[in-house]
Amino acid sequence: MKKPKHLLSIADLNRKDIEFLIRSAIKIKKNPSKYSDSMEDKTLLMLFEAPSLRTRISFETGMTQMDGHAIYYDMKESTVGKKETIKDLANVVSRYCDLIMARIAKHSDIMEIAKNSRVPVINGLTSYEHPCQILSDMMTIYEIKKSFKINLAYLGDGNNNTTHSLMFAASILGMNISVASPKGKDYEPQQKVIRQAKQFAAKSGSNILVTDNPKQAVKNADFIYTDSWMSYHIPQEEEKGRIKIFSPYQVNNSIMKMAKKDAKFMHCLPAKRGEEVTAGVIDGKQSIVYQQAENRLHAQKAIMLWLMGIKV
């Protein structure tokens, strides 16, 4: 049996793949009715270990709009880890469904699902990467700039799935990226991510800066991106301490003024106003967070069709 194609990591894609997915997503967004039966009689299984608003609703809506069906399965109700292995789960459910999307804590678990699946597997989020979010972000950037020759700054938690996927996508596409986060392995991007992104950057001609200086990171930025300081795997009792550590990296009006005049603000949501970003920025004219969120729907349709080998 032919091995299925998966989307587990941005690092598994090349520039051609990413650009194809973005072009496809833009086509789907412009003419969604053209794809209204593209997933006829197809079923997507959605495995959720981490909570979700955008991931669940965008995938489920995407399948419905393409005449397919999506099943939501809460991993808290699962026998996995109690009476069943990940291997058994993947072998069984991939005999029922045409696609699997998993939003799951450990990256090693999604790798195990893909290894044992007969059908394509999509990483809906792990603690290591968030590829679906970042593909929709790259689509949003391209809609605005019509180019990837831009400067992207990320402020905040660098040891974060969104940061990792952003670094991979930017370096593959030839986009300059600056990441500003507090010093220390708990807060900086993982060293293996930095090494791999720099390898991609050497081929694409992009520049990567990892610093603890937010002002340095946002200089000449076209886009400023941040994310929650409290990822799902962070214990709640650490919140007060993390707010103190990350407060110099808050995206506020003074930070936005250090970037280019027409710089845009990005956030993958959910956001805490008053923590990683002020209300004035996220609700202001430079914010494109809702465009990003909408594009999850279109990008995920493109991903599913691509993995299924269905022409866009």
Image (spheres, rainbow, N blue to C red):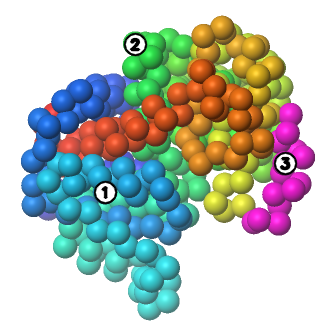
Q: Label 3 neighbourhood size at 10 Å, few (<14), some (14-19), many (20+)?
A: some
- Residue at 72% in and 19% down: 256
Question: What main secondary structure does the magenta stretch of the protein show?
Answer: helix
Q: Which mark is residue 60?
A: 1
User: Which of the 4 quarters of the picture holds residue 110?
Assistant: bottom left
Q: Tell me if residue 211 can be seen.
A: no
Q: Left or right: where does residue 201 sit relative to residue 80? A: right
Q: Is residue 242 magenta?
A: yes
Quadrant including the C terminus: top left
What type is the residue that disc 2 sits on? Lys
Quadrant including the N terminus: bottom left
Label pair 2/3, CB-CB below 8 angstroms: no
Find numbered disc 1 in the image and state the secondary structure of the residue it sits on: helix
* Residue 303 on image: x %, y %: 29, 43
Q: Which residues are magenta?
A: 235-248
Q: Which mark is residue 243?
A: 3
Q: Is residue 181 magenta?
A: no
What type is the residue that disc 1 sits on? Glu
Which comes sooner in the sequence, label 2 or label 1?
1
What type is the residue that disc 3 sits on? Ile
- 3D distance between C-alphas at marks 2 and 1: 29 Å
User: Which of the 4 quarters of the picture holds residue 196?
Assistant: top right
- Provide the residue designation for mark 2: 146
Q: Tell me if residue 142 can be seen.
A: yes
- 3D distance between C-alphas at marks 1 and 3: 34 Å
Q: Nearer the viewer, residue 291 or 135?
A: 291
Number of marks in the image? 3
- Residue at 14% in and 53% down: 67
Q: Nearer the viewer, residue 285 or 105?
A: 285
Find numbered disc 3 in the image and state the secondary structure of the residue it sits on: helix
